[in-house]
Structure formats: structure tokens, C-alpha cells
Amino acid sequence: MEIPAAFKIGAVVIDPPLLLAPMAGVSHSPLRRLVASFARPGLFFSEMLSARHLPEDVRANSLWLQRAAVERPMAYQIVAPDPVEAVIGARAMAGYGAEIIDLNLACPAPNISGRRRSGGHLLADLTRIEEILGALSAAVTCPLTVKIRLGTKPDLGFLRDLAGVLEGCGVAAVTLHPRLTTEKLKGRARWEYIGHLKTMTKLPVIGNGDVNSPADCLAMFQATGCDGVMIGRAAVQKPWLFAEIIGSEQAKGAHFLWATYQEAWRLITEFFPEHQALGRLKEFTWYFSRNLLFGHRLAARMQSLRSLAACREYMAEELFLRSCGFE
Ligand SMILES: Cc1cc2nc3c(=O)[nH]c(=O)nc-3n(C[C@H](O)[C@H](O)[C@H](O)COP(=O)(O)O)c2cc1C
């Protein structure tokens, strides 16, 4: 079996039906371009963006908003606790040229879901979700999507009610990461709930969680009937994963890994100023090092470094790099 055909979110064609997940600190423009250099997913996502700061971010043309021509179509993901902030952010993003605006109803991080009462916290209040989505639908004309988790317990009744609210508010598609809001990334994603959601709604359903290989991706399509598959961590570890899924072969020997790692370095250090590049390199290395036999050495060494200059020095240590598994 091959992956299914394209699907649509509003008028936006998602071809192939594969999506690069929003990941704060990770799914920045350099990563998106690295992924696109192997094969473009059908839809990119920005990192989660605080809605109330977006007018200022637009004025500053912030690095979190910028993208190259190849990073299209793209959904800008906003996070907001109420309709007022959500509309401020969505209008700013629509004015910036977003093809799609995505509302985060999933993030479990304490500063988002706790203190800011947004992200996954909102799943406890369907009325508030209805108010936010109603205001957003009235404020922008581009398609509106949401990314959700299961809430505080696996509950089909709740999922059905939520699906009803989303349809009623004119949402154009829904992504389900089927973990609880209390689980962060622990345990396994309950794919069966993606299948349940698919039977509950006419909206396109995007499945997400624990897809690590082309076989996993096909299995998620087959097991759930979802319209699209969103991939996060595995696409950072293997930026060529979408290319593998759509069947364009890639050589993955040590030489290929070294060339890809160097390209990631180039993209990140050219795009970000030094103080931001260092953190992003560490994050990327954390995932990418899993491709190497002794990658833990690379990740551990990288985490301990305090400047790009120090990183550059270790990038030149041939013996050390060989000992990690690079050629
Ligand atoms: C470092 C990191 C940052 C993330 N940031 C976001 C985010 O900004 N918005 C969001 O909706 N999900 C975020 N997520 C969750 C991912 O989008 C995705 O739902 C999750 O990683 C499960 O998919 P995966 O198994 O393919 O990684 C983040 C995940 C990780 C690992």
C-alpha cells in the first residue's frame, strides 16, 4: 500500500498528506529548509507563537515568522487564553500571509497550560474553546485548524462533544496527538482515538504521535483512516524521513550523515545570531545524534559547550567525530 492522495484544508491542498509538526525551539526555518531539501511535506508549521505578541513580532519581522519560498504552505500556530488575544494574533498572522492559522489546544507545558491558561488547559472548557474559535472565524478568512490532545482522561464522549464544537465553529481540520494533557510525551500515543475521531467528524483528521519510520506512517494511515500524518521528533532525527515515505531513496551512510549534519550547522548558524544559534544547534544535535552508533558522545559534548567557537573546535576534531560514528 502507498500513502493516500492529497487532501484539502479549506482551499489549501496538502500534497503529500504529510505534515511537519510544530515544535518550539526546533521547527524553525533552518530545520524546515533542511527537511525540504530532501522532500517537502504537504504542510509546514511554525513553532507555537504567543498570540498577544504577534503584532510586535510582525513589525520586527521576527525570525520566528520568517520563511523561505520553499516553506509553503505553512500553518502559523498561535497560543492564546481567550478570544481577545487569539484575534490579535490571528489578524497579525493573516496580514503576514499565513495560508492557515492553527490554534494550539494541546500544549501541556506549565507556563502555557498552567500560568497562561492556554494550550492544553483549554480542553477543560469547551465553552471557552467555542468563544475563541467563534471569534477567530469571524476575524480571519484563511482556514482555521486546531491541534488537540485527549484531555485529562481517554473519553469518547468528550471527544465527540469537542468534535461537534470544532465543526460548529467552522474549523477546517483537526490534528489529534492522542496523549493526555498530563502525559507530556510519556507512554504511547493511543492511535485508536485517531480512528474514533475520524468516525465522529466530517472534518479532515490529521493523526500524530510516535511515527518513526515509513512503515509507522503507513500503519497510522491504515489503522486510523486519517487524512494526513503529522511527524515531529523523527523528522528532526531524520530530516529525510518524508523523502523516504514518498519513496525517493536516500543513501544513509556515515558520509551522508556528516554532510547532513554540516548542512544543518550552516543553515542554523547563518539564520540565527550566535546566542540563539547555540541553543538550536544543541536541540538539533540531541535528536540527530541518535543516527550515530555512539551519538550519545556527540550529544553530551555538545550540551556542555558554551560558545559557537567551542563547538566549531570540536567539529574539527576528526578522531572525536569518528569515535561518535561519523566517517
Ligand atoms: C521539542 C518539542 C517541542 C514541541 N513544541 C510544540 C509546539 O510548539 N506546538 C505543538 O502543538 N506541539 C509541540 N510539540 C508536540 C509535537 O508537535 C508532537 O505533537 C509530538 O512531538 C508528538 O509527535 P511525534 O511523536 O511525531 O514527535 C513539541 C514537541 C517537542 C518534542
Image (tube, grey):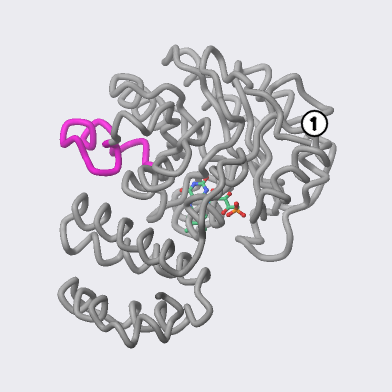
Q: Is residue 301 left or right of residue 162?
A: left
**Mark 1 sits near ligand 1, with its Cβ under 8 Å away:** no
Q: Residue at x 50, y 50 (%)?
A: 240
Q: Which residues are magenta?
A: 49-66
The picture quadrant where one finds residue 300 is bottom left
Q: Is residue 110 left or right of residue 313?
A: right
Q: How far across and how far down the image is residue 199, in percent?
A: 84, 28
Q: How far across and how far down the image is residue 156, in percent?
A: 84, 40
Q: Residue at x 35, y 47 (%)?
A: 28
User: How many numbered marks, from 0 up?
Assistant: 1
Q: Which residue is mark 1?
A: 160
Q: Amino acid at mark 1?
A: Arg
Of residues 311 and 306, which is closer to you in this image?
311
Residue 26 in the magenta stretch? The answer is no
Image quadrant where one finds the N terminus: top right
Q: How far across and how far down the image is residue 2, in percent?
A: 73, 35
Q: Residue at x 35, y 43 (%)?
A: 33
Q: How far across and how far down the image is residue 314, in percent?
A: 25, 81
Image quadrant where one finds the C terminus: bottom left
Query: In this rendering, is residue 109 above or below 97?
Result: below
Of residues 82 and 242, which is closer to you in this image?
242
Q: Residue at x 35, y 20 (%)?
A: 94
Residue 53 in the magenta stretch? The answer is yes
Q: Secondary structure at mark 1?
A: helix
Query: In this rendering, is residue 292 above or below 227?
Result: below
